[in-house]
Amino acid sequence: MALPLVPGRRRNPDRGYPFFLIPAAVLFTAVIAVPFVMNVGLSFTKWQGVGPLHWIGLGNYQRLWHDRTFWAAFEHNVAIVIAMALIPTALGLVVATALFDYIGKRFGPRTASVLRACVYLPQVMPLAVMGVVWGWILAPGDGVLNSALRDIGLGSLGHDWLGDPHTALYTVMAILVWIQLGFPVVVFMAGLQRTDPALNEAAELDGAGWWRRFWHVVVPQIRPEIYVVLLMCTIAALKAFAPIYVLTRGGPGISTDIPSYYSYQNFFEKTQVGYGAAIATVLTLLTLTVTTAFIIVQNRHQDQER
């Protein structure tokens, strides 16, 4: 039974909703906002982790601007973005379409689901385990890859894949593509479930080949999923730390160093806390800028389609 309204007062149905946001707001403040403000404050100081803080203003940022190691790490991060965002997105689109449009129809949806789970498996494996496994595979002496090359008569191609500065970054990129591929495949296969088959059949009746149907009919319908995958994979690439720590620890030399690991090195190993905080602050601002740009472009395309 509805309660009678008090004369002169209107009931606001949205009045109670803000209270449900309090736990999330408290958690955001405690876990993200306060540590970030403290990190920004430390970036203006010279501190070794113990003892008094020395205020140096923009000194750490001036040093960062002229630090060749940081810029080299930044270039390596661009390569990591290519390996973790661009290549998995393009490759995942093709693999998902092949599983959905060919394997699923020819061999049944159960076979497609099993293959999708196999592709997604590296996403759920612990990175420490993957580091050990790839260490065995890529070992310079009796590693699986070099042994296989010798067995097929290509022993001259045997290499210290992670120990050579000229090949270490490309090897890490290949491993990251293998790790990251499962996420786009799962998202794109979910997106393909909601595409309109009538549009595909109409294009096929009009004589459109597979590629034209894929590019002009399928891709526009799953464009929101493509934006989500690109955004999440780019953010993951910018803050990538664990794969580098497990596989190479930034080496040999600085050939695979990236800003997140360089910040860790300065913060904990070299005890240059202020400088490490400055690197982390720049990396956070870069991530926020990229995220904002992605959202603006996505909203602009959605407005044009309406």
Image (cartoon, helix red, strand yellow):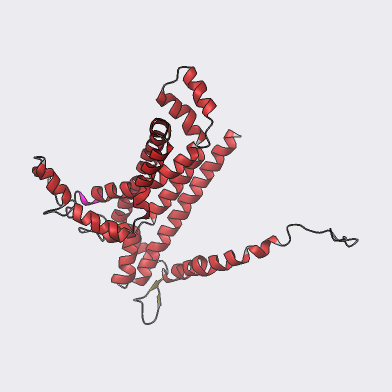
Q: Quadrant of the C terminus?
A: top right
Q: Position of residue 170 (x, y in %)?
A: 24, 47
Query: Which x, y percent locates residue 67?
Result: 30, 60
**Left or right: where 150 falls relative to 103:** left
Magenta stretch secondary structure, dominant: loop
Q: Residue furthest right?
A: 7
Where in the figure is residue 239, as x and y percent of width and height?
39, 57
Say whether residue 151 is left or right of residue 298. left
User: Going by the image, does 133 lie left or right of 288?
Assistant: left
In which quadrant of the rendered view does residue 255 lie? bottom left
Residue 221 as seen in the image, left or right of residue 10: left
Instruction: Give the magenta-colored segment's residue range.
Output: 162-169
Question: Residue 214, located in which quarter of the rendered image?
Answer: top left
For the image, the number of numbered tags is 0
One can see residue 195 in this view = yes
Name the one closer to the observer, 117 or 249: 117
Q: Does residue 169 lie above or below 94 as drawn?
A: below
- Location of the N terminus by quadrant is bottom right
Q: Quadrant of residue 284?
A: bottom left
Observer-nearest residue: 218 or 74? Answer: 218
Residue at image location 49% in from the left, 26% down from the top: 200
Residue 238 higher or lower than 56, as above or below: above
Residue toward you, 154 or 233: 154
Where is residue 212 drawn, in percent x and y?
A: 43, 24
Q: Who's the residue at 55% across and 40% down the image?
A: 300
Q: Residue at x 73, y 57 (%)?
A: 14
Q: Is residue 234 magenta?
A: no
Judged from this view, the residue extending furthest toward the bottom is: 51
Q: Is residue 163 magenta?
A: yes
Q: Is residue 66 visible?
A: no
